[in-house]
Image: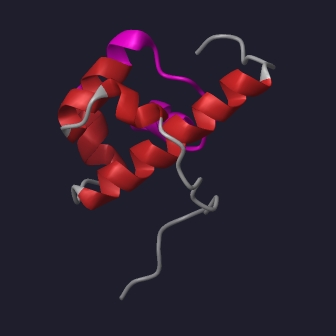
Amino acid sequence: MGERSRSPQAQQARAHVAGNLHRLRVRRGLTQAQLAERLGIEVRHLQFIEAAESAPGFDLLVDLAAELEVAVGDLFEEAETPARRRGRPPKA
């Protein structure tokens, strides 16, 4: 994971990717562990991306879009950033 950009535009793009990634993953019924396994990456790396703490590289963006069945550009669309949560969700 490279040095974090301080550019407001880069931070905004990272937040859009994070929000869309989370929304699309949940919509497809995938856990972070399942998506990470399909992509061949560590779960922690995916968690950092979904928390907008890290930006995925180009190849990973392409793989994420393919796995979620969306265009790469869809990941950059303005999205609601999910509230940051810690721990597991409550059981239903």
Q: Quadrant of residue 13 in the image?
A: top right
Q: Quadrant of residue 11 in the image?
A: top right
Q: Is residue 42 visible?
A: no
Q: Is residue 24 visible?
A: yes
Residue name at image x 45 percent, y 14 percent: 57
x, y percentage for residue 67? 20, 34
In the displayed structure, would residue 82 be above or below residue 51?
below
In the displayed structure, would residue 71 be above or below residue 68?
above
Residue 48 lies in the magenta stretch: yes
Residue 44 lies in the magenta stretch: yes
Depth order, front residue of 33/62: 62
Residue name at image x 24 percent, y 45 percent: 34
Left or right, residue 3 beside residue 47: right
Residue name at image x 47 percent, y 73 percent: 89
Depth order, front residue of 8/28: 8
> On the rendered image, what quadrant is the C terminus found in?
bottom left
Depth order, front residue of 33/80: 80
x, y percentage for residue 81? 59, 53
- The magenta segment is 39-60
